[in-house]
Amino acid sequence: MAKRTQDPRLTALYQAGKQVYSISKINTIAHCLHEAYRTYILREPGEEGIYGLLGTAIHEKLEQIMNHQADPAELLPAMEKELAELDLFGITFPNSPREGVSIRDRWVADMTHFCKTFVPPVGDFETEQLFLYPLSENRYIHGYIDLIRHNEDGTISIFDWKTSSNFKKADLQHHGRQLILYALAKEAEGYKVRDVAWNMMKYCTVSVPGDDTFEKTVLNRGDLTRFLEGTLHQMLEQLGMDELQIHLLLEHAKKENSLSVLPEEIQRQIHVEPYLLSYDCTAERKAECLDYINRNADLFESLHPHDITAYPPRPFFVTRRNGKRIDDTFYCHVLCSHRNTCPHIQTHDRIKLFTSNDEDMDLF
């Protein structure tokens, strides 16, 4: 990732001794104080995960495209180049196949379709805009907004690119705080925010002929032609094609995961659009967001920076499902920037590996 030049406004805050946070730092404090200690007190660089590295590469190319500094055709090569480099350095996806398909293959199929079909939206846009939001006289939070559209009515719309999986309902508040913060910051600058949304790049919406509900189906981009196979078969039959022609066309479409190999009459009838997931900026959500930020900032500032015992690891939550214990260590193994050097997760894993009767153990 190309390192940003520090904005003079940020430099001035640091030089004045202000406490400056990002939503990422706040979330790290909330998730694991030990990770926060190593990252923000000891200043250990840690390791970025595969999702962050791939997301960064795609974000950077999208920024260039939106600023007319690159062509949309460069998006797929940029993704493939980053994947090749990560493979070379042994940085891999989690190994947890679903329905016989690896996480890597599913991610690549979804994002390949996005890259091949991306069309820059038309309008007045700004990218990667820095915001500084004062939480108090001595505390600020900052960040960069992926995409801002200036609407004709004088309002703005805020968008965040996401290469992750669709959010579960239970996780919406956690992810939504970032969008709420963006809206708060731009409102403080005098803008009227019409709406905020995520562009969930792995997904698309599809509408087909004869859909009386006019509701769009949301699906993984990599599943597009398989999802439409039955509908496409009927449409090709209506064009007078025989079974062999239909079979060959559909197999070609599924191999390429593309509708572009089909007759134009069919392409015009099927509408495939980006999946924009909106989030309502209610007064309650704004209040909750600020409380969450200040509560975790208060906690972090209350701890002694030279006392490592004040920064415990996140609990390895233990639940029982169908008589089995399940440890919640996905964050530790996949998302934590110190996942390969953290002594707490290493100890946890050793205990699990060498203890046969771990069902009755109390860990940490």
Image (spheres, grey):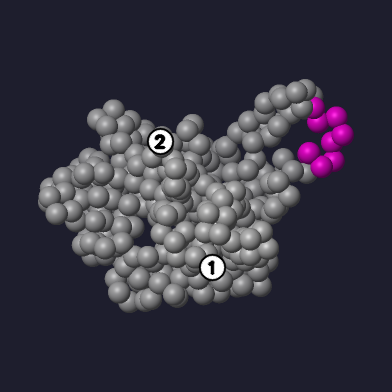
Of callouts 2 and 1, which one flags the residue occurring earlier in the amino acid sequence? 2
- The mark total stands at 2
Of helix, strand and loop, which mostly describes the magenta segment? helix
Report which residue position mark 2 lands on.
213
Residue 161 seen anywhere in this rendered image of the structure = yes
Q: Residue at x 16, y 45 (%)?
A: 192
Observer-nearest of 254 and 357: 254
Is 353 contained in the magenta span? Answer: yes
272 shown above or below 298: below
Residue range of the region highlighted in magenta in the rendering: 351-359
Does dot 2 land on a helix, a strand or a loop?
loop
- Marks 2 and 1, Cα distance to the nearest angstrom? 28 Å
130 shown above or below 133: below
Residue 325 on image: x %, y %: 74, 28
Report which residue position mark 1 lands on.
261
Type of amino acid under label 2: Thr
Instruction: Locate residue 62 relative to residue 54 in the image: left or right.
Output: left
Residue 38 seen anywhere in this rendered image of the structure = no
Type of amino acid under label 1: Val
Observer-nearest of 205 and 344: 205
